Structure formats: structure tokens, C-alpha cells
Image: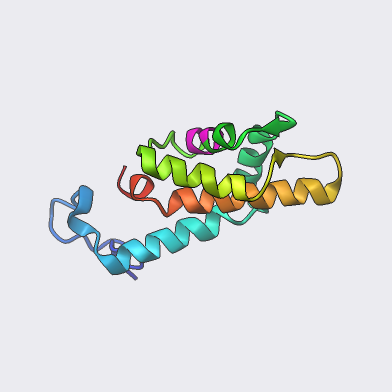
Amino acid sequence: IGYQGQELLNPPSVEGWHTGQEWINTGALLRRVNFASEQLGNTGLPGVQSIIARIATKETLTAEEFVGECLDLLGPVKVDELTHKELVQHVEKGGPMRRGSTEPEQVAFAVRVGETLQLIASTREYQFG
């Protein structure tokens, strides 16, 4: 009950839950990030599979294109320049973004999509945007 800061059927007042940062504390924020990360990293979920399929329409993507696709499909999410740069650098460390034609290549691609979605879900912009 109250796992992410809002206890079901028990609002803080008759007005209900207020929006914004008022109901988010560090514990609730950590639970939100962990929940989103767990869901978005689960490449077996239909929604995540749909995101993977939409990104995989191109054979090869630059790290910048890949991050842009992930951000668009999650919102679209707008991140500041530094966050964007860090996301791109992380993707670049893993090598070229290729969906591949063999099952192991496609699984590796899906895992990288899931990891990138998890990173985006942990950003300030995703949580407070």
C-alpha cells in the first residue's frame, strides 16, 4: 500500500492527490525509478517488444539516432543536452547499433534497447517531465 507515494483509495485530502513534486519524496522516487526500470528492461513484455520492433525498422542506427528513437517512443521525452550526451556516450560504448539477422544478434539488440530505456527512465527529465 502506498508503494509509490499514493495509497490506493486514500488520498491526502478530499481534493485527491496533488500533482508535481508535492507527493514525491526520495523513497517514492527510488521506487518509481526501480519500477519503471524493471518494466522497461523486461524485453518479454508486449509493450517493450513493440518499442524494440519500431526501433528495429532500420538495419543500423547511429548512437544519436538510437537514443532519439528511444526518447521519442517513451514520451516523447525531452532531456537536457548533458543527459542526451551521456545517453549517446553510453550507447557508443556498446558498439554499433545493429538489429542483426541472426537470433543472437536480435536478442543482443533487444537487450541494448531495454538497457537504454532503463537509463532514460532513471533520468530526472523522465521522472519529473
Q: Position of residue 37 (x, y in %)?
A: 50, 57
- Residue 35 horizontal/vertical position (percent): 46, 61
Q: Quadrant of residue 85?
A: top left
- On screen, residue 36 above or below 83: below
From the viewer's side, name the closer residue of 118 and 7. 118
Q: Residue furthest right?
A: 102
Report if residue 85 lies within the magenta region. no
Name the dominant secondary structure of the magenta segment: helix
User: Residue 105's x, y, as percent?
Assistant: 80, 47
Q: Residue at x 70, y 35 (%)?
A: 56
Quarter occupied by the N terminus: bottom left
- Examine the rendering and report whether any part of residue 4 can be seen: no
Q: Which residues are magenta?
A: 68-72
One can see residue 94 in this view = yes
Which residue: 45% across, 63% down?
A: 34
| Residue sitting nearer the eye, 121 or 79 | 79
- The way the protein has been coloured in the rendering is rainbow
Which residue corresponds to the image point at 21% horizontal and 48% vertical from the top-left?
A: 20
Residue 69 is left or right of residue 105, and the answer is: left
Expressed as whole percent of the image width and height from the top left, the position of residue 51 reads: 61, 39
In the picture, measured across the screen, residue 102 lies left or right of residue 45, that is: right
Q: Is residue 89 left or right of residue 60?
A: left
Inspect the magenta stretch and tell me whether residue 69 lies in it: yes
Q: Is residue 76 above or below residue 24?
A: above
Q: Is residue 9 above or below residue 74?
A: below
- Depth order, front residue of 19/29: 29
Image quarter of the C terminus: top left
